[in-house]
Amino acid sequence: MHWFLLAIGVAIEIAATASLRLSDGFTRPGFTALTLMCFALAFYLMSLVVRTMPLGIAYSVWAGGGIAGVTLLGATAFGQSLDGYAYLGIGLIIAGVMVLNALSTAAGA
């Protein structure tokens, strides 16, 4: 269950970051409110996750998933140009998360 909550939290954190971009420096009230609500919900979910998952593992997955997700969202939704090294980096992040999940005993059950 903690992996599911973590995945939902990362997805909401990615939405929060996209809303942050759309808030235009907190000058657009609707996107500003959405940003704050999404970040609050994402942090709440993270607080539930770290009850049962080691903090270092949870945060590594959270940060890596957020970086990869926001980078891909930037490319698809905001027209950010990515080069081969950007894709390589995203692949390495995803591989690292997979290794943590599939092979490491530090991640817990």
Image: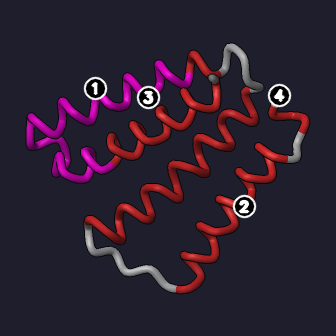
Residue at coordinates 47% horizontally, 34% vertically from top-left?
8
| CB contact under 8 Å: marks 2 and 1 | no
Mark carried by residue 108: 4
- Residue 86: x, y in percent? 55, 76
- At 37% from the left and 31% from the top, the residue drawn is 39
Decide which of tag 3 and tag 1 comes sooner along the chain. 1
Mark 3, secondary structure of its residue: helix
Asked if residue 101 lies left or right of residue 38, the reply is right
Give the crowd class for mark 1: few <14, some 14-19, many >=20 residues within 10 Å.
some
- Residue with the most extreme bottom position: 84
Ranked by sequence position, the earlier of labels 4 and 3 is: 3
Query: What residue type is disc 1 on?
Result: Met
Is 43 inside the magenta-drawn segment? yes
Q: Main secondary structure of the magenta part?
A: helix
Q: Left or right: where does residue 31 sit relative to residue 74? A: left
Q: Which residue is mark 2?
A: 95
Q: Which range is magenta?
A: 18-46
Tell me the quadrant of the picture where the N terminus can be found. top right
Under circle 1, the secondary element is helix
Cα–Cα span, label 3 and label 1: 9 Å
Please name the residue that numbered disc 1 is placed on: 37
70 relative to 7, above or below:
below
Marks 4, 3: nearer the viewer: 4
How far apart are labels 1 and 4 at the CA level?
30 Å
Q: Which mark is residue 42?
A: 3
- Name the kind of residue labelled 4 in the image: Gly
